[in-house]
Image: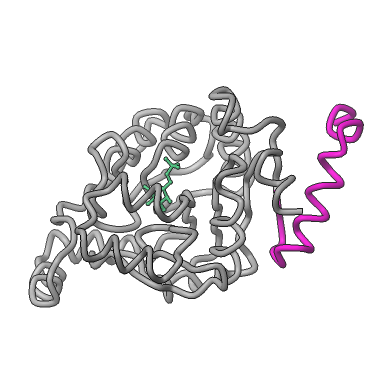
Amino acid sequence: SVMREVTGINEMEQLLQRKLGINQVIIVAGDSDHSPWVKKELGLATANCMKSLLKGNNIIAVTGGTTMSSVAEALTPSVADGELLFVPARGGIGEDVKNQANTICSMMADHTASKHRVLYAPDEVSEEMYKSISNDPRISEVLKLIRSANLLVHGIGEALTMANRRSTSKRDLEKIKNAEAVGEAFGYYFNEEGEVVHKVQTIGLRLEDLSSVPNIIAVAGGASKSKAIRAYLKEAPTSTILITDEGAAKKLI
Ligand code: BG6
C-alpha cells in the first residue's frame, strides 16, 4: 500500500529478509511491547498470510502463547476454502491453560468453524514415560497428524521470560541462565549463536522435523524479542515466514 511505501516498511522487510537469511518477512507498524493493539495487528497479518497459503484441506500445527492467541482471535471461516484441522505442535511445556497450544487450537477451530485435536500429555515427561505415552493409540494418532502438518504457526519468546512464565525447575532455570539462552520456540531454548542449550522434554514436533513441514510461519514482535528472534532464525528453515513488528524489526536491522 501507499502507506507502507511512505513509512518505509516495505524497504525494512526486504532488508530484514536479507539480514536474517529467510525468504519472507512481514512487518506491522508499532511495537507490541508498548501498545497492545500491535499484537492484534500481528494476529491480523498472520491470519492474512495463512489465508494466502491455505488451499484445500490442511492440517495446521500450532503452539501456544499470547501472540498465537491474537492469531486465533483474528481468524475467520473465510481463511480456507477446504477443511482445516488444528493440532498442538507439542505436548505440555509448563504453560498456564490460557497459553497452552491445546487451548489455542480449540480457539482456532471455533473461529474458523473447523476441527481440532487435543494432545492429552503431561508436561515434561521422563524418558520412560515418553516411550510409553508415544505408544498410546490415542496419542500416537495425534502425533501422526502433527508430523503430517502442512503448516506450522508458532511464537518465539525471550528465553528467561518463558522459563519464568513456565513451571521450570530450579535446576533447569540455572541451566538456561548459565548457557546464556536468549530465545525460545516450542520448548527449545537457544543461545545467541542459535544453538539449542535446553529443551523441554515432551512429545510432539521436534526441531529436526521442521525441515519436512512445507510452510512455517513464526510470529513474534516487540523490541524485547529481537535477540530471541535473531537467535532462533539462525537455525530455523530458510523457508520460514517471519511476521513481526517495527519495534523488533528496528533492533534487528
Ligand atoms: C509459547 C510457545 O507457548 O509461546 C513458544 O510454545 C513461544 O514457542 C511463546 O516462545 C511466546 O509467547 P508469547 O506470549 O510471547 O506470544
Q: Is residue 2 above or below residue 147?
A: above
Q: Closest to the observer: 109 or 211?
A: 211
Q: Residue at x 35, y 70 (%)?
A: 198
The image's colouring method is: one colour
Majority secondary structure in the magenta region: helix
Image quarter where the N terminus lies is top right
Q: Closest to the observer: 67 or 217?
A: 67
Residue 18 location, x and y as percent? 79, 63
- Left/right placement of residue 7 relative to residue 132 reads right
Q: Residue at x 54, y 24 (%)?
A: 36
Q: Closest to the observer: 46 or 95?
A: 95
Which image quadrant is residue 169 in? bottom left
Can residue 114 be seen from the camera position used here?
Answer: yes
Q: Residue at x 36, y 65 (%)?
A: 176
Which image quadrant is residue 112 in? top left
Residue 162 location, x and y as percent? 37, 50
Q: Is residue 24 magenta?
A: yes
- Left/right placement of residue 4 relative to residue 216 reads right
Residue 63 location, x and y as percent? 38, 50
Residue 201 location, x and y as percent? 24, 67
Can residue 203 be seen from the camera position used here?
Answer: no
Please report the bounds of the magenta region as a residue range.
1-25
Q: Is residue 191 above or below residue 9?
A: below
- Left/right placement of residue 68 relative to residue 222 reads left
Q: Is residue 109 above or below residue 136?
A: above
Q: Residue at x 14, y 76 (%)?
A: 127
